Image: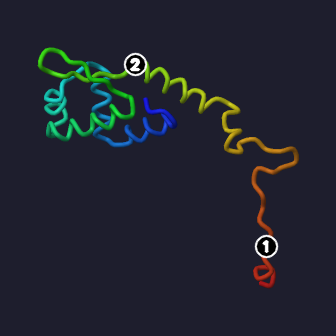
């Protein structure tokens, strides 16, 4: 998985519908480009381009099997991504983004009326 922002790169890679469909197929079984092309009814070159994006995000890995290259889910990266998502959703994890309130601070500040709107 890419260093830096692994969650962002994984979500960005899976944000495309075709790549998500590829990923879901590979979750069940390892496939070569030709088999994925047939199952998704898209060209082999399109499959290869989508697999490149998934591979760069660390979500899939190639494995040579005879004269074919089969792609599969990269399990170690998926475990890391799963842990990162759990940590992201854990209570208190939003403190970096300012998720906690200071004592006496209101959740929603009511805007005061401007001088113009008070005249009406």
Q: Position of residue 108 (x, y in %)?
A: 75, 54
Mark 2 crowd level (few <14, some 14–19, many ≥20, 10 Å Cα): some
Residue at image mark 1: 113
Q: Where is 83 relative to 100, above or below?
A: above
Extreme residue toward the right, this view = 104
Look at 57% across and 27% down and name the residue there.
Answer: 86
Extreme residue toward the top, this view = 66
Q: Position of residue 115 (x, y in %)?
A: 80, 80
Look at 13% across and 15% down and name the residue there.
Answer: 66
In terms of secondary structure, where does tag 2 sit?
helix
Q: Position of residue 100 (x, y in %)?
A: 75, 41
Q: Quadrant of the C terminus?
A: bottom right
Q: Is residue 45 left or right of residue 22?
A: left
Disc number placed over residue 39 in the picture, else none: none
Mark 1 crowd level (few <14, some 14–19, many ≥20, 10 Å Cα): few
Q: Is residue 66 left or right of residue 15?
A: left
Q: Which comes before the other along the chain, label 2 or label 1?
A: 2
Nearer to the camera, 78 or 2: 2
Q: Where is 86 relative to 43, above or below?
A: above
Look at 76% across and 82% down and name the residue there.
Answer: 116
Q: Is there CB contact under 8 Å for labels 2 and 1?
A: no
Look at 38% across and 37% down and name the residue there.
Answer: 14
Give the quarter of the image for residue 44: top left
Residue at image mark 2: 75
In terms of secondary structure, where does tag 1 sit?
loop
């Amino acid at each position: 998985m890419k260093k830096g922002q692994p969650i962002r790169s994984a979500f960005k890679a899976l944000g495309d519908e075709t790549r998500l469909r590829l990923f879901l197929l590979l979750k069940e079984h390892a496939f070569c480009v030709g088999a994925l092309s047939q199952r998704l009814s898209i060209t082999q070159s399109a499959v290869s381009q989508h697999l490149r994006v998934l591979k760069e995000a660390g979500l899939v890995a190639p494995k040579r099997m005879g004269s074919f290259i089969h792609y599969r889910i990269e399990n170690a990266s998926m475990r890391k991504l799963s842990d990162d998502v759990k940590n992201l959703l854990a209570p208190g994890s939003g403190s970096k983004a300012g998720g906690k309130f200071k004592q006496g601070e209101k959740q929603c500040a009511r805007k005061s009326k401007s001088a113009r709107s008070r005249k009406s």
